[in-house]
Image (tube, rainbow, N blue to C red):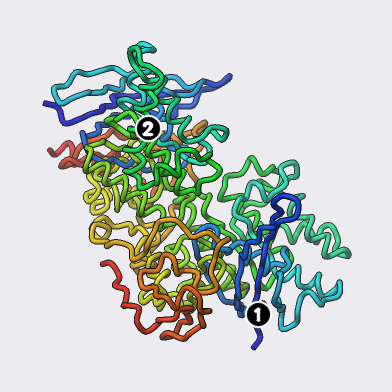
Amino acid sequence: MNDDILLIKNLVIEYELKRYSIRAIDDVTMAFKRGSITAIVGESGSGKTTLASAILEVISSPGRIISGDVLYFQNAQGFETKINNLKPKQLNHYRWQECSMVFQGAQSSLNPVMTIYEQFYETMMVHATGNIQKGELKEKVLRRAKEVLEIVNLDVDRIMPMYPHELSGGMKQRVMIAFSLLLNPKIIILDEPTTALDVITQDSIFKILKNINRDMGVTMILLTHDMGVVAKFADFVGVMYAGKLVEYADTKSVFGKRLHPYTNGLISATPSIIADNSSLKPIEGVPPDLLALPSGCPFHPRCPQAFSKCPLLKPKLIELNNHLVSCHLYDKEETKA
Amino acid sequence: MNEIIELKKLHVVFSKRVGLFRERRFHVLKNVDFFVRPGEIIAVVGESGCGKTTLGRIVTGLLKPTKGEVLFEGKPIYGFLNADFANFRQSVQFIQQDSYAALNPVRTIYQSLRAPIIRHHRKMKNDEVDRRIDELMTFVGLNPPEQFLVKYPHQLSGGQRQRVLMARALSLNPKLIVADEPVSMIDVSLRLSILNLMSELNKKLNIAFIYITHDLATAKYIANDQRIAVMYLGEIVEVGNINDILTNPRHPYTQALLSAVPIPDPIVAARQKDIPIKGMNIASIENRTTGCSFFERCPYAREKCQHEQVPVVKSGNAQIRCHYEKEIPIWVKPQ
């Protein structure tokens, strides 16, 4: 038996430029539980999107997997598939039928000169297997489109003949979610699905996503920087900083313990409408430059709890009661145990 | 009173030609009364498309209202002669959302900061201008100034560019700064420091701020114990003290908005209830009725709401636009 649906193992991704290379993902190991919602939190440049594109095997050039694997387990019996070894045909099946993605900015993910129906049709056609007649396919598209658009609360007959510019931002985002469901995937990656939407629309979209997760058992990976959204929506949280996974645990544990100083900083920098905000404080310093990463722990120049060891040694990811953290503050406890 | 800016019965209508003779009209701001007192921070919140940016552009004089008056220190700005208008322009500054688009990409920071100063202070000597620029840069936390002044906008981070915009807005000693979503494009860890800078400017230099946003949490943080105006479809539906409104919102729309704000605490978030609202889409601004603009989505709406013009009523310390103010249930804050 295997609880995990996806396992990222010692993954290293570099973008090679003329004179130097940028390490966007630095030795990340992370497991995603079947049927869970896992949030990956981090600022811009922390490697969230690169990680997601590694899962779909769509890393844009000049990016390259240097080492490590992305393993996919189709069912609980655990036939593992190495995503980075798939042949084009298998990859074509894996993308969208096993794992799909809702991209950031739904506005620009839809083709502006095709109606929603045509785009649904195109996707189904590309992924259709065997000999399928045109009429048969058309019927299949209509049936499936009706199903998925109903899940996201859109009026099928009204939406299908429309062009993307006729839809509002929230509607486009819901069409994109319907799109990602089209071929019954087991995993959906959501890259900042609600930025640029207002809170009421955001709330309704997360309700829909939560229903999809609960009713259909779809595993979701949410990339975001909004701690409020994470608290409301995710079961597990992974915090990334400068291409490294610095903390990983279930949501309550992360918010309750905040083991890593960066996680603590992020949560204490998030204003809330119900709390007294007088204890809020920003994280000092600026996000790291990936070209000139600080030595040792990349967070040490901004860390209020940094000590002599931090600039010298890279911390390892250690486990403390099902709570993964990568910080020298907890090294000692590891040796005790 | 000594308001810096006062808007009276303001209407803005945008029209768009459709075909040869027909015109589509969008009533973007409807009957807006608004004022800003010296040294206060007022947050303007609402969904996208509710007219909050239009309000900001009216206040800064970038857009002329279709109907109604804009008063600067008690005098209508569109009756000003050149000198008075220049004074108004200097006193009211604007900070845009996209700091990258707001700075000229082929000018250094020094050139961008120098331009407004020499435009308005022709007689100022060069070394005086330089000293002023250094002073401004230090004030907004870009230290040492020499290191940043020679750079181009693309060489700075989002947070640093936003600080440059603050410095540029400050350079003419304004009385009011309109900040349109100044932190929405900045990394979370840096947002708070920009907001802190704004409240520092407010306290030290007594500059008033209009903070335009859709994020109620940051609005609460910056306008702590000051005023908030909630907008919906071009109308100000609720205005009053922010602490009062966030604990006891009286307008059904404000209640819905507050219920939807995600709370960064998983235990509280799990207990959040459904949003008291009908329909997920913001109503179209085109086919609005004469009545309440929130009518279509309001769970408490009745027949009267659709057609009868809504009066502004007092509710506690706040002023709201609602026919049935007394019958709206009390909102319970998630804990």
Residue lying at 48% horizontally and 30% vertically, measured from the top left: A118
Q: Which residue is mark 1?
A: B8
Which label lies toward us, 1 or 2? 2
Q: CA distance from mark 1 to mark 2?
A: 53 Å
On the question of residue A28 being in view, the answer is yes
Q: Nearer the viewer, residue A239 or B322?
A: B322
Q: Position of residue A175 (x, y in %)?
A: 42, 40
Q: Residues within 10 Å of mark 1 (few under 14, many from 20)?
A: some
Q: Are marks 1 and 2 on the same chain?
A: no
Q: Quadrant of the N terminus of chain A?
A: top left
Q: Residues within 10 Å of mark 2 (few under 14, many from 20)?
A: some
Instruction: Please state which amino acid type lies under the numbered disc 2.
Output: Leu
Q: How many discs appear?
A: 2
Quadrant housing residue A83: top left
Question: As drawn, is B66 to the left or to the right of A161?
Answer: right
Where B205 sits versus A30, above or below?
below
Instruction: Please state which amino acid type lies under the numbered disc 1.
Output: Lys
Secondary structure beneath dot 1 equals strand
Where A169 sits versus B213, above or below?
above
On the question of residue A312 being in view, the answer is no
